[in-house]
Structures are given as structure tokens and as C-alpha cells.
């Protein structure tokens, strides 16, 4: 955990993972770059936070950057267009955004707006998501792809929506689902637009390997696929089957997995066409990943390809396969969500306080000290670079012996406190010496355990659930003082009452570390930290652990004069709102508390002034922000 002597901010590898969206300003502030206006000045993120606070919007805060989202949509559509032109592909690309990745209204509204020039559509995996999709004005040739388990109500709405001009495709997930479709078709007397999900055998690597291959949840194996084709032919509806859906996987780390999976999907497309199925669209599902670490490797939190390379691989593979089979090129569809929206949002939170695991001073020796306290203090006399391991061993031994004596009642609280303070002072000195020598792994491992705890104003479970659930890595970095050498290391603890509520894996220049380089806190200045690329899934998956609700949300647009415009503000949940989510009526809570107070007044345990103060405090709390104010 030693700090490297280099450009101060280089330790955070911002240039590697930042995707040219963030950079460090000369004053040490982290800045946001407008990808749609490369020549525009970088906008200081701390200045944005200050500007939002002047408007009454405080941290913790989810910050959405409109141009980052627009760039995500442009990137995938333009990359497919370039690949289609270069390869000579005779079909077109029609992407859809999976609503499940981020269902927030402000996000979907902007995706529809920015995607309209590309005839970009939406994917709905549930009835509520279909309701969202149908409330938007899409381009005339944009798709609404309906995946997931569908009941008659879902299917009925999807079929009827075609009367309004929507290209709503019902993707069949099973033969049983087809029977429900047939019942609704008979009821309505209207033909559907159908797709069929084919289960590929190719399995990807990475965190979401189980979203692909034989054991993946959705899709039909070949025997069911043939049965569905035969049933559609039997009922005279085979001509309605226009789209083949073949989900490649999720967050695919290796581009060669993309090639293999697309190749297998093409084989099904070719064979279904030979069966007489009039397919016009090949939907390859999700899979396009995000390089969270910037390492450009085929690993769980990285990818070894770019968006352009992904698109080129898809287009080339489909072109070669269908040309060889002598078939027309279909319209290509992908359901990339993470790659479109992940970079558009960041979580910004302030550090409240720190628990430090060293000390800059130690108590003076005292004749009444236990001999182990004296021995511990004496280590200072021979502490040097060449005896670093020896001193660490001795300090650990004496400290552990003192703790054992305290547990058995042989030394008192004050002796124990003196020993602990001396030990922390020794650790401070060892930390100072360690960067100057080639420390052994054992020393580094021990010092890693002595990282400070920076207590931060956010809930991991609400705002970064994947960090807790699947060890997802997000770039995390201080937002200021990046022109100063970070002089401490810390793990980040949230304000939930849960030991799991912490971030202890960080993306640094020399790899993933168990602690984050930070700066000594200055009580006169706030210290902000940002977690980046949180636009995919994090808002939707968050829970109410300890009843911490949604944070404040602000959507901004970067201006060419190094300032910003506030496009939208959403206030975070109040305590009253959160209570209602878990079946409490806030009015009942107020009434019950008032009853307790009135009883205390009646029993003369409180006076009238106390009653007023207590009721005001309770009302202020129930109407306030769930986070630290």
C-alpha cells in the first residue's frame, strides 16, 4: 500500500479509464470534458457541485451528464454505420435500449430524443417497461422488442399497439408462450409481429457467464424451436415470424466470444430461413461491455475491444456467414444497455469524518507504565529502514500481549490506551519509511490492514448495489487536490449500520488495490469523492437498507464557457416517502408520536414548551432527507 513518487494524480489511472470524458485541471480539480464539443474547456466537477449546492442540491448526489449519454448513443450507432459501409453490408442497423438497465424517466426520455435520428428503439422485458415504451414517440421504423415472460395482458397490449404504428415485436420465449399468443390473436383478430429467442450453446467468460450457454435462463433449445416453427406453420402464422433473437451474453470481456456467438446465431438464422421462416431481423441481444478499469484486457471488469471493434466483428461475421449461404442480409439489432448509459452518471458524496490507524504523537514515558508499554515505546530507538520488518514484528507482538493482559484484567483502560497510542505512532513512522525502501510483501500486507476508514455520506446498497453484490469495480477517485500527493490510504465506509457497507477495492495505476490513496482531511474544506460509470443498473437495483432512499439527482449539460446548465433536478427521498415504501403511513407515525408526547405532558414529565420542541423535531426529521445533512 505504499504511495508511488510520481505525478500526484497518476496513481488513480484517470487517463486510462476516463474514456476522454474526465481529466485533471491544473488546480487539482477533476474536470468533465464534453465529448460532443472536444475543443470546449474542461468543466471543474467541484465547481459543478458548488453551483448545485447554491441551488439547494446537496450531496450525496447522482449527477447525470447529458452529453455523455448522447455520446454513448452516437458511438454505437455511428460505429455500426461505419462498419456496414466498410464491409459492404446490404442491411441496416436498428438498435434498441433495454429499459431494465436504467428505467428512470429522465434517462429514457433523453435516450429516445438522442436516438430518434438513428431510429433507435426500446426493449421491454416486463409489462411496466412496455407501458413506458408506448408512452414515447419513436421514429417510424424504430423497434419495440418485447422479451421476458409474457402473460395475455402483456401480449394483448403489444399486439394492439401496432394499430398506433409501433413496430412492437413479441419475442417468443417458449412453446407455451406461443399458445398464449395464439389465444390472444384469436380474441383480437389481429396478427402479431413475432420474434423467437434461440438459446445459443456458446458460453462467454466473465461475471455474467451464466447469461449464456445451455444453462441460460431464457431462449429455446433446437427441439422447442422446431416445434414453434411447426406450430406457426400449422396455424398459418409463420409469415409473422420476422425476428430471431439470440442473446450473446452480458458484459462480454473477450471479443473472440462475440465472434463465436454471432457465428452460431447466424447458423440458426440460416437454418430457420431454409425452413421457410421469413426472417428479416437478427437480434443479437446485449453483450457490448464497458472497460471499467481501462486495462483493455479480457477480465471481469474490463474488455479487450472497443465499440468500433465490436461493431466491426458483428457486421463482418454476419456478412461472411450469410454471403456463404446465399441469403439476403437482415436488419441487425442489438440491445446494448450498459455501454450506452453506464458512463453517463456518477455518484458524488462527501466524507464526513475519518478513523485513522496511526498517530503523529505518542505519550511521554511514565515510571508507572507496564514493562510491555515501555518495550513498545523503546522500538522508536532502533526503528530504521534496514530493521523495518523487525520493528513491525516487535510492535505487533507487544501490542497483542498488552491486549491479552487487558482482556484478563491485568492492566487497566488507561494503560491499554497508552499502549495503543504508542503502537499507532510507530505505525505512522513505519508508513513514512516504507515508501523509501523496497518493502517486503508482508510489510505491505500489514500496512494495508492499517488503512484509514473514511466515513462517507452515501449508502452502498442504495447507490452502488453491484459493488456489494458481485464485487463490481467502478472508478473511484477524489474530486479535488489531485495536484497534491495523497498522503493517506483509506477504505470508504457508508453511513448504513452494516459492516458490508464499504468500498475496499479500487482501480489504481498499478492494479486493483484494497485501499484508496486520499488526502488528510481539512476541517475547513469539504472533501468529495466520486464513483464513476454508475449509469447502468445501479439506480434500479438499489434497495432501502436502513431506509436510506434515493439520493438527490441532477442532470446537467456542459457549456462551452466552462460552466453548466441544470436541465433537471429530482429531490432525494424524504423519510416520509421512504416510510411509505415499507407500509408506514407518515401521518400515523406523527399521530402516534403526538399521543406519546401528550401522555408525557399529562403525567407532567414534559411541559408545553418541551411538547412544541419535540413535535417540531419529529416533523423536521420525517420531512427531511434520509442522508446526513
Image (tube, rainbow, N blue to C red):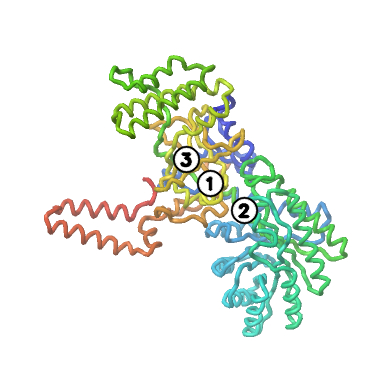
> Do tag 1 and tag 3 residues touch (Cβ < 8 Å)?
no
Please, what secondary structure does the residue beneath circle 3 have?
Answer: strand
Q: Nearer the viewer, residue 580 or 376?
A: 376
The vertical placement of 1 against 547, above or below, is above
Residue 196 in the image: state x and y as whole percent: 70, 70
Mark 3 or 2 closer to N-term?
2
Mark 2 or 1 closer to N-term?
2
Q: Is residue 186 visible?
A: yes
Total residue callouts: 3
Please, what secondary structure does the residue beneath circle 1 have?
Answer: strand
Find the distance from the CA under tag 1 to the CA under tag 3: 16 Å
Which numbered dot is residue 492?
Answer: 3
Find the distance from the CA under tag 3 to the CA under tag 2: 25 Å
Mark 1 — residue? 346
| Residue drawn at 62 percent across, 51 percent down | 207
Q: Is residue 328 left or right of residue 605?
A: right
Mark 2 — residue? 338
Amino acid at each position: 500500500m505504499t504511495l508511488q513518487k510520481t505525478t500526484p494524480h497518476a496513481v488513480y489511472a484517470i487517463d486510462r479509464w476516463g474514456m476522454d470524458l474526465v481529466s485533471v485541471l491544473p488546480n487539482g480539480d477533476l474536470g468533465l470534458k464534453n465529448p460532443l464539443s472536444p475543443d470546449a474547456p474542461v468543466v471543474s466537477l467541484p465547481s459543478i457541485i458548488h453551483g448545485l449546492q447554491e441551488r439547494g442540491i446537496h450531496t450525496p448526489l447522482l449527477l447525470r451528464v447529458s452529453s455523455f449519454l448522447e455520446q454513448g448513443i452516437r458511438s454505437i450507432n455511428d460505429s455500426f454505420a461505419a462498419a456496414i459501409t466498410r464491409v459492404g453490408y446490404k442491411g441496416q442497423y436498428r438498435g434498441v435500449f433495454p429499459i431494465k438497465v436504467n428505467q428512470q424517466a429522465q434517462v429514457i426520455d433523453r435516450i429516445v430524443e438522442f436516438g430518434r435520428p438513428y431510429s433507435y428503439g426500446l426493449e421491454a422485458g416486463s409489462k411496466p417497461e412496455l407501458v413506458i415504451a408506448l408512452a414515447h414517440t419513436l421514429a417510424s421504423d424504430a423497434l419495440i422488442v418485447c422479451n421476458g415472460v409474457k402473460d395475455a395482458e402483456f401480449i394483448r397490449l403489444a399486439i394492439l399497439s401496432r394499430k398506433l404504428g409501433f413496430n412492437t415485436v413479441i419475442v417468443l420465449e417458449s412453446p407455451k408462450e406461443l399458445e398464449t399468443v395464439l389465444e390472444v390473436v384469436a380474441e383480437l383478430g389481429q396478427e402479431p409481429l413475432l420474434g423467437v429467442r434461440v438459446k445459443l450453446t456458446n458460453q462467454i467468460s466473465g461475471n455474467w457467464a451464466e447469461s449464456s450457454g445451455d444453462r441460460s435462463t431464457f431462449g429455446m433449445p433446437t427441439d422447442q424451436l422446431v416445434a414453434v416453427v411447426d406450430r406457426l406453420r400449422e396455424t398459418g402464422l409463420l409469415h409473422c415470424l420476422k425476428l430471431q433473437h439470440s442473446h450473446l451474453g452480458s458484459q462480454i470481456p473477450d471479443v473472440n466470444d462475440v465472434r463465436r456467438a454471432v457465428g452460431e446465431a447466424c447458423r440458426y438464422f440460416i437454418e430457420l430461413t431454409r425452413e421457410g421462416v421469413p426472417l428479416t431481423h437478427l437480434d443479437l441481444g446485449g453483450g457490448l461491455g464497458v472497460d471499467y478499469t481501462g486495462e483493455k484486457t479480457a477480465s471481469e471488469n474490463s474488455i479487450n475491444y472497443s465499440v468500433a471493434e465490436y461493431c466491426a466483428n458483428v457486421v463482418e461475421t454476419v456478412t461472411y456467414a450469410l454471403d456463404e449461404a446465399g441469403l439476403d442480409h437482415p436488419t441487425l439489432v442489438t440491445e446494448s444497455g450498459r455501454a450506452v448509459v453506464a458512463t453517463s452518471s456518477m455518484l458524488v458524496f462527501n466524507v464526513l469524518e475519518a478513523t485513522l490507524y496511526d498517530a503523529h504523537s505518542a505519550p511521554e514515558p511514565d515510571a508507572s507504565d507496564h514493562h510491555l508499554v515501555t518495550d513498545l515505546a523503546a522500538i522508536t530507538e532502533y526503528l530504521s529502514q534496514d530493521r523495518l520488518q523487525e520493528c513491525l514484528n516487535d510492535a505487533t507482538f507487544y501490542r497483542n500481549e498488552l491486549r491479552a493482559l487487558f482482556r484478563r484484567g491485568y492492566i487497566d483502560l488507561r494503560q491499554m490506551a497508552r499502549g495503543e497510542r504508542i503502537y499507532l505512532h510507530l505505525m505512522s513512522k513505519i508508513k513514512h519509511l516504507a515508501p523509501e525502501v523496497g518493502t517486503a510483501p508482508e510489510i505491505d500486507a500489514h500496512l494495508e490492514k492499517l488503512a484509514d476508514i473514511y466515513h462517507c455520506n452515501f449508502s452502498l446498497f442504495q447507490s452502488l448495489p453491484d459493488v456489494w453484490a458481485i464485487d463490481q469495480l467502478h472508478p473511484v477517485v477524489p474530486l479535488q487536490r489531485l495536484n497534491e500527493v495523497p498522503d493517506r490510504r483509506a477504505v470508504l465506509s457508508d453511513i448504513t449500520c452494516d459492516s458490508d457497507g464499504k468500498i475496499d477495492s479500487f482501480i489504481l495505476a498499478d492494479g486493483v488495490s484494497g485501499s484508496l490513496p486520499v488526502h488528510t482531511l481539512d476541517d475547513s474544506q469539504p472533501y468529495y469523492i466520486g464513483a464513476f460509470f454508475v449509469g447502468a443498473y445501479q439506480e434500479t437495483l438499489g434497495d432501502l437498507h436502513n431506509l436510506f432512499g434515493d439520493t438527490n439527482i441532477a442532470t446537467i449539460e456542459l457549456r462551452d464557457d466552462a460552466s453548466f446548465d441544470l436541465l433537471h433536478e429530482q429531490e432525494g427521498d424524504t423519510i416520509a416517502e421512504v416510510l411509505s415504501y415499507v407500509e408506514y403511513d407518515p401521518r400515523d407515525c406523527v399521530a402516534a408520536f403526538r399521543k406519546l408526547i401528550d401522555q408525557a405532558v399529562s403525567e407532567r414529565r414534559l411541559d408545553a414548551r418541551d411538547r412544541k420542541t419535540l413535535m417540531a423535531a419529529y416533523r423536521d426529521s420525517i420531512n427531511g432527507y434520509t442522508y446526513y445533512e
